[in-house]
Structure formats: structure tokens, C-alpha cells
Amino acid sequence: MALVQHEESVYVTCSDALDDYGYVLSLQSSGNAHKCTNTELPIGIALTSTKDPITGTAQSDQKVAIVRRGVAYVKLDDANSSISPGDLVGVSSTAGYVDKLTVDTTDAESLWSSLRKAVGIALESKSANAGGKIKVLLLLGGV
């Protein structure tokens, strides 16, 4: 189940082939979405894959539904840190995935740099290196 509860989804063209739902996406300068890297601002979670319904092969440059608010299952990095309910999760070093977010409070610039990577709040526990998906209260568009 990709989605538990949400406000509303929108459709965007995704330049990456998505084999599953739950990827964190960001916008390219072309206006298309792609798997978000840890240097980009996340804009939404993919609620659908880009798999061809006949061949089952994920294709690039396809429309995907994304959501920014609500509760959704998000792809968790296979090398994730241990996560507890209430922990912030953000874009990991693996494009399209999340991990526990470490917030740097050294100064205002570091704090902003950390928080702009936030995807949401974990609603369930995950042990270290669990991977898979995690249930998240989405905070995209502001922390």
C-alpha cells in the first residue's frame, strides 16, 4: 500500500524509471521530476511506479502521481540508521531514498541546510540496515 492518508496527489513526468512506489522526487530545471539526491530539495513522494503494465519493465519519462502531505510509505536506504517513531527522516545519500536525518544546529546556515532535506517524521521503528519502506508523516513544503 503506497498511501495511508493524504491531502491530494498531483501528476508529474518523471525522467527516471521507477520500479516501485515510495521514491523521494525532486524537480529538474526542465520541470520534470527525478529521484532526489541529498543536494536537492525534495518535492514529493511517488505514489506509483513507471512500470509498463504489460511487460512489467520500468520506463523513463512517464507520468507519476506524487504527494507532499499526509502519511505515505517511503523507500528506506538499505544502509539506514536505526529509526524510532518521531525521528526526522530526510533524503539519504542514495537518490530517491530516506534515512534518519541528523540536524546540524551549529549555526543558522547549517540548520537550514539540514532541514531542507527533511521529508517527514517516522511513524514506525526500523532497525539499522533494514531497508524496505517506512511509514512517514510527510512534511514536504515546510518543517
Image (cartoon, rainbow, N blue to C red):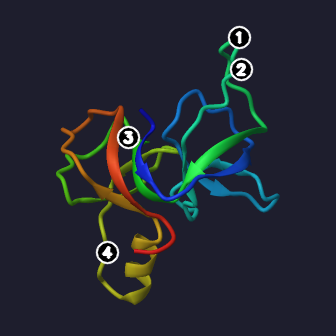
In the image, is residue 121 above or below residue 125? below
In the rendered image, which residue does mark 4 sit on?
Answer: 104
- Residue located 49% across and 59% down the image: 7
Please state if 70 lies on the left or on the right of 131 as rendered: right
Q: Quick one: SS at disc 3?
A: loop
- Name which of mark 3 and mark 4 comes first in the sequence: 3
Image location of residue 72, percent across then percent down: 41, 47
Image location of residue 3, percent across then percent down: 43, 42
Residue 36 in view in this figure: no
In the rendered image, which residue does mark 3 sit on?
Answer: 76
> Closest to the observer: 143 or 127?
143
Gap in angstroms between the C-alphas marked 4 and 1:
45 Å
Gap in angstroms between the C-alphas marked 3 and 2:
24 Å
The amino acid on which the numbered mark 3 sits, given as a three-letter code, is Leu
Label 4 neighbour load within 10 Å: few <14, some 14-19, many 20+: some
The amino acid on which the numbered mark 4 sits, given as a three-letter code, is Asp
